[in-house]
């Protein structure tokens, strides 16, 4: 069974999380997944959770799992 390492990079809006993750992913050869981008993609693709995601994002809250 393959094992994966998962890193979480936390910080406020605009602090450079995405920039740093992109740089690390190039240097360390891992895949960068942005939760914010995944949620925006779910909204754009009319996911069954689209309305809930959009309401939570617009209110500035953390999206529940």
Image (cartoon, rainbow, N blue to C red):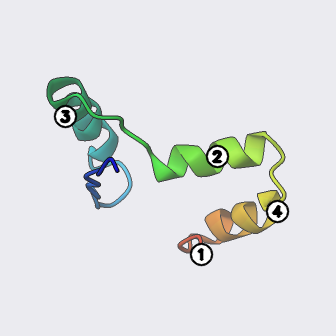
Query: Is 45 in front, or is 2?
Result: 2
| Badge 2 or badge 4: first in the primary sequence | 2
56 sits left or right of 33 in the view: right
Q: How many residues crowd mark 1 within 10 Å: few (<14), some (14–19), many (20+)?
A: few
What's the distance in space between the residues labelled 3 and 1, CA to CA? 27 Å
Residue located farthest toward the front when viewing the structure as drawn: 1
Residue 44 percent coordinates (x, y): 76, 40
Q: Which mark is residue 40?
A: 2
Taking 13 as reference, is 46 above or below it?
above
Residue picked out by circle 4 = 51
- Residue found at x 59% / y 70%: 63
Mark 3 touches mark 1? (CB < 8 Å): no
Disc with the residue nearer the chain's start (3 vs 1):
3
Is the Cβ of the residue at disc 2 closer than 8 Å to that at disc 1?
Answer: no
Front disc: 3 or 2 = 3
Element marked by disc 2: helix
Residue corresponding to mark 1: 64
Q: Secondary structure at mark 1?
A: loop
The residue to which callout 3 is attached is 24
Could you tell which of marks 4 and 1 lies nearer the N-terminus? Answer: 4
Q: Earlier in the sequence, mark 2 or mark 1?
A: 2
Residue at the (66%, 41%) spot, across then down = 41
Q: How many numbered markers are drawn?
A: 4
State left or right for residue 62 relative to residue 54: left
Using the numbered discs, state the Cα–Cα distance from disc 2 to disc 4 in whole angstroms: 11 Å
Q: Are marks 2 and 4 in contact (CB under 8 Å)?
A: no
Q: Quarter of the image containing the C terminus?
A: bottom right
Q: 2 above or below 11?
A: above
Q: CA distance from mark 4 to mark 1?
A: 13 Å
Between marks 2 and 1 in the image, the one whose residue lies nearer the viewer: 1
In the rendered structure, the answer to whether residue 14 lies left or right of residue 24 reads: right
Q: Is residue 51 above or below residue 61?
A: above
């Amino acid at each position: 069974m393959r094992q994966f390492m998962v890193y979480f990079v936390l910080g406020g809006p605009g602090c450079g999380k995405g920039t740093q993750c992109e740089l690390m992913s190039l240097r360390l050869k891992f895949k960068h997944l942005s939760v914010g981008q995944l949620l925006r993609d779910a909204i754009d693709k009319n996911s069954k959770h689209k309305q809930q995601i959009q309401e939570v994002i617009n209110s500035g809250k953390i999206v529940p799992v």
